[in-house]
Structures are given as C-alpha cells and as structure tokens.
C-alpha cells in the first residue's frame, strides 16, 4: 500500500495504482474533465503510477495547463486521422501555423483541403474518439528520432532534434502513428470529444471550445485583419527560410544569422514606411493612436514611426497616455484591493480630451508629466501647439477605444494595433504561443529596468492578461493598421537573458512549474550574440542598448 495526500486528506492506494484510476474516482468533485495530475507540485500524465508519500492534485481542461494538454492531444488526433486517410505523404505536408478564433490555422503543402476531405477527417477523428485508443509515450535515442522523422517526411522535426542537447527524445504513439509534441498528453482518445474542422482561406481551422467553458462551442470569429497580419508574417518567415526553430538553429550554426537579422529589420522598416506614407496621404489624420498588449514594443515603434513620418514631411510629437493618469488616490482598485492602472478609469479622460481638442483647434496647451513616485501629474512648462504639418503620435493601452478620445472627430484619428505575433513554429505540429514570447520579453525588460524578479513577472502575468482581454483585444478589429513587432530571431537572443532569471525560481515556489516549462522551451534554441542586434531594433527595448530613450 502507498500513503498519499489527496484533496487535503491522507489515504492509502494499492501499489501500482495509476493517476488515471484515481482521476476516475475523484472526477465527480470537478466541473471539467481531469487530464493531468500534480505530484508534489510536478506535473504528471495520468498513465503514471502514484508514488508513495505524494501530495496529489488534479488539473482539468478548465485549468490553463489542462486546456493546453487537451488541444495538443487533439492535434495528434488530427494528424492520425489525416494519416489514416491520406498516408505518410499527405500528413507530412500538413502544417499548423497560428491561432485563429479559438483554434489553429492549418495548411497542406500538396493540396487545398476541401469540405469533402475535411468531412472524412472529422469523421475519422470522431471514430478514433469512440474507440478510446491509448496515447502512449516512449523514449528513443535522438539519432533514431532524426532518422524516423526524416523517413516520415517530417523534416522540421528531424532538423529540430539535430540541435538537441539531450541524448533522448520522448515521442507519442497513437495506434501505430508516431509524432513528437512539446508538452503532455491525455491518456486516450476518449477525452477528445470537443473539436470541429472548418475550411478557411487556403487551409482549414481546427477549432476548440473556449477555455472557460471547454465543453461548448462559440461562433467562429476569424478576425480577418489579424489573420492577414499573421499570414503575411508567416510568409516572410518562409521566404527567409526560418519558419521553424530547427531552421533558425541551422542559420545560426552556419553563420548566416546576421543576414537574417538585417533582412527582417529591413522588412519591418519597410512596413513602417508604408504606414507613414498612408498617414501622410490623409491630410486630416492628426492623431496617430497606438495600442497593443504588454511587451509589444510600443515605445520603440512610436519612435521609429515618428522618424518615418519626418521622412514623409510631417512633424510628429509623441504623447504617452500614461501622463494622463488620475492622481494616485483617485485610481480605481481591483477586486483584491490593488490599484488597477490598466482600466480606463485610471486615466483622466476629461483632461485628455480637453487637451487634445484644444490642440486640434490650434491652441497652445501645457502638457502634463506623470510623476510615478508621487502619484501626481506635474506641469513643468512643457507646451505644445500644432501647426499644419504637425501630428500627434499617442501611445497607450486604451488608444483604440473611442471612449478614451470621445471628443475627438473620428476623421482625425488613425488607429494602429501593435502586437508581437510569433511567426516561428517549433516544428510542423508544435507552435509557439504569442503570449510566451511577450512574457519572456517582459521578464527580461522588467529585470533590467525595474529590478523585478522572473517570479514576480510570472505571478503578475495572469492579471496582465485579464487586463488585455478587457481593455485591448476587444478593440483590435477597429484598427486601421495592424503591425507585428515579433522578430523571427528574438527568442534566440532573449534566451541568454531569461535563463538565469528563470533558474532563480526555486522548487516549491508557485511559479516553479511555469519557470521549468519556459526553461525547457528555451532549450530548443541556439543562442545569438546580442551585439548583432541593431540599436534601433524593437528588441533593444527589452535587452537594453537602444538608440531611443526606452
């Protein structure tokens, strides 16, 4: 018998008991399906045997890690179904790209999947779910994995493993079909009941239920502007031949990464120039409103766009909406009693509109500077008056929300949505979450500029994400332009700054699991010397050494 603690109570289980058996017994106590176990704070798949003297908790599909496990397992189910219908050649041509609505956009190298093909795949997936087939993990030598996936036509995986530091690889098998995935899986296919395949653009979307209600579906919402921004970024990654981590590592190893860095910076500068030209062609656009989620590089973007506006004959003046914070004692508080600096109520909206309207009328305005130490606005003689060629470059999280600039004529505003939308994949079937890239950016920047620990950044991240969901993402579709600030090569640079910070998080601390996951993720990358990064790069906002005051 083995002694364990589960749900805070001591109990005994028979030797050889698995977490799957325990999960079935305790499932009635959870609103969503159990898909993972925590054993003394470490994540475990349900097929594992329970260890003696373990403290056991369960994670469901309603938990972030459980939800990711569900989606990851469903991708394996999709690939198995495509393999059963089309064989090795067809499945080797399938590539998973980026998020669309609540799902993932996928394409085929060989043919555009039509509705008839998708109906066959969906029917096979549903059949596999009914069969409750086991998803099995096994460990093989790296050399064997390289040979196996090269033979299966999954060359991005073979390239990824070439640079692997470990001598072994964990692969998953589903009824004879083998694949590699970054992260854990559910124990069998019966768990994967909720999904749908939808034709979209040049491929299809594997759609999931929302995380908050993982047993129901919402209407498919593709957000065309965002989709096209991601699709264009993905196209450039393929043109530069660095669509996956393995390909990036190969460019680094071959000494070609300098050209890749300069090429992508040039692409970004060209896009900035196109935006500036578009603004300059519209003579009534006096307010350039820039918004985006945390760590998108808004400050550097504003400076670089201002330079391009100068080159197009305009005189830009940058304004940070943060200088219009209400006095600290008037700042709203969240449900935990902490100041909520991310809600619109934290901004002196009346004063902002009063000042911006006066500037549009050609009046001189005394501009505020917010003192974050005293929590008060200060007026230090900084005045501004707009002439015929002057424009305001206004940056803040609420800039796309017309409630911030309610008094300003709509025709005077040009709205830009900025985000770091990761275009790099780990391999054909493993994508990199945009939120991971932004969190690593923020971790590095906060440690450098604020002395904040990685533990603090990770602990605050859920609150940051909630603020983005409330104040930024609902308005992104209102933007006139979307700009992707993610750099194909950036994680290979950030790696050397982030790893020491993450190693500082100790086992037993609440953020340890996330730190361990991020360290494993960064281990895929070969490092890049930060001296290769141009001084005006958006990446400099995070690692330091920027030409701009950021």
Image (cartoon, grey):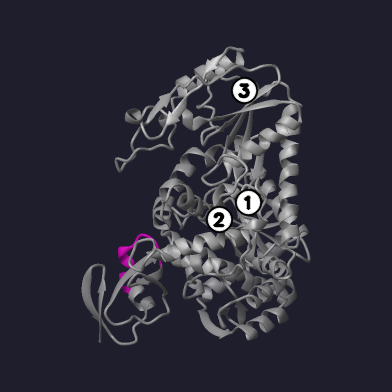
**Nearer to us in this view, 304 or 79:** 304
In the image, residue 474 sits, relative to residue 185, either above or below, namely above
Numbered mark located on residue 437 in the image: 2
Where's residue 92, x and y in %?
71, 72
Q: Where the N terminus falls, by quadrant?
A: bottom left
* First in residue order: circle 1 vs circle 2: 2
Q: Are marks 1 and 2 in contact (CB under 8 Å)?
A: yes
In the image, residue 247 sits, relative to residue 293, either above or below, namely below
Where's residue 464, x and y in %?
44, 46
Q: Residue furthest left?
A: 10
Q: Where the C terminus falls, by quadrant?
A: top right
Element class at badge 2: helix
Q: Are marks 3 and 2 in contact (CB under 8 Å)?
A: no
* First in residue order: circle 3 vs circle 2: 3
Residue drawn 58% across the image and 50% down it: 101
- Residue placed under numbered mark 3 in the picture: 410
Residue drawn 41% across the image and 64% down it: 504
- Residue placed under numbered mark 1 in the picture: 486
């Amino acid at each position: 018998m083995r002694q364990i603690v589960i749900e805070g109570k001591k109990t005994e289980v028979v030797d050889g008991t698995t977490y799957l058996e325990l999960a079935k017994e305790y499932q009635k106590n959870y609103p969503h399906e159990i898909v993972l176990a925590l054993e003394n704070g470490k994540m475990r798949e349900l097929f594992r045997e329970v260890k003696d003297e373990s403290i056991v908790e369960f994670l469901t599909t309603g938990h972030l890690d459980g939800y990711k496990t569900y989606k990851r397992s469903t991708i394996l189910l999709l690939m198995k179904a495509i393999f059963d219908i089309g064989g090795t050649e067809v499945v080797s041509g399938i590539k998973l790209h980026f998020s669309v609505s609540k799902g993932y956009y996928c394409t085929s190298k060989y043919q555009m999947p039509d509705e008839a093909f998708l109906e066959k795949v969906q029917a096979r997936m549903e059949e596999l779910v009914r069969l409750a087939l086991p998803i099995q993990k096994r460990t093989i030598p790296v050399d064997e994995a390289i040979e196996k996936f090269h033979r299966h036509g999954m060359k991005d995986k073979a390239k990824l493993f070439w640079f692997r530091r470990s001598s072994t690889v964990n692969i998953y098998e589903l009824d004879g079909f083998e694949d590699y995935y970054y992260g854990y899986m559910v124990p069998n296919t019966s768990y994967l009941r909720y999904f749908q395949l939808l034709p979209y653009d040049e491929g299809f979307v594997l759609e999931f239920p929302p995380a908050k209600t993982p047993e129901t579906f919402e209407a498919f919402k593709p957000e065309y502007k965002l989709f096209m921004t991601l699709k264009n970024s993905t196209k450039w990654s393929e043109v530069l031949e660095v669509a996956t981590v393995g390909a990036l590592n190969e460019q680094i190893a071959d000494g070609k990464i300098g050209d890749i860095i300069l090429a992508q910076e040039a692409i970004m500068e060209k896009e900035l120039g196109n935006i500036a030209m578009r603004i300059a062609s519209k003579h009534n656009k006096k307010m350039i409103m820039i918004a985006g989620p945390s760590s998108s590089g808004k400050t550097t973007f504003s400076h670089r766009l201002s330079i391009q506006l100068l080159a197009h004959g305009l005189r830009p003046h940058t304004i940070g909406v943060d200088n219009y914070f209400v006095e600290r004692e008037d700042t709203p508080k969240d449900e935990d009693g902490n100041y909520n600096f991310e809600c619109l109520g934290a901004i002196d909206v009346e004063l902002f509109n009063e000042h911006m309207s006066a500037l549009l009328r050609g009046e001189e305005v005394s501009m505020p500077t917010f003192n974050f130490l005293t929590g008060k606005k200060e007026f230090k003689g900084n005045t501004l008056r707009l002439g015929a060629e002057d424009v305001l470059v206004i940056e803040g999280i609420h800039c796309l929300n017309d409630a911030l600039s309610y008094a300003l004529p709509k025709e005077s505003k040009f709205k830009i949505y900025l985000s770091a939308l990761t275009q790099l994949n780990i391999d054909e079937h493993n994508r990199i979450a945009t939120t991971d890239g932004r969190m690593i950016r923020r971790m590095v920047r906060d440690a450098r500029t604020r002395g904040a620990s990685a533990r603090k950044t990770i602990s605050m991240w859920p609150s940051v994400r909630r603020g983005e969901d409330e104040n930024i993402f609902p308005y992104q579709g209102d933007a006139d332009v979307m700009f992707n600030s993610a750099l194909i090569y950036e994680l290979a640079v950030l790696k050397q700054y982030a790893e020491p910070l993450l190693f500082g998080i100790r086992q037993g601390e609440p953020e340890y699991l996330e730190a361990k996951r991020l360290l494993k993720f960064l281990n895929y990358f070969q490092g890049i010397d930060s001296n290769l990064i141009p001084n005006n790069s958006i990446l400099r906002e995070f690692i330091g050494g920027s030409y701009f005051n950021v």
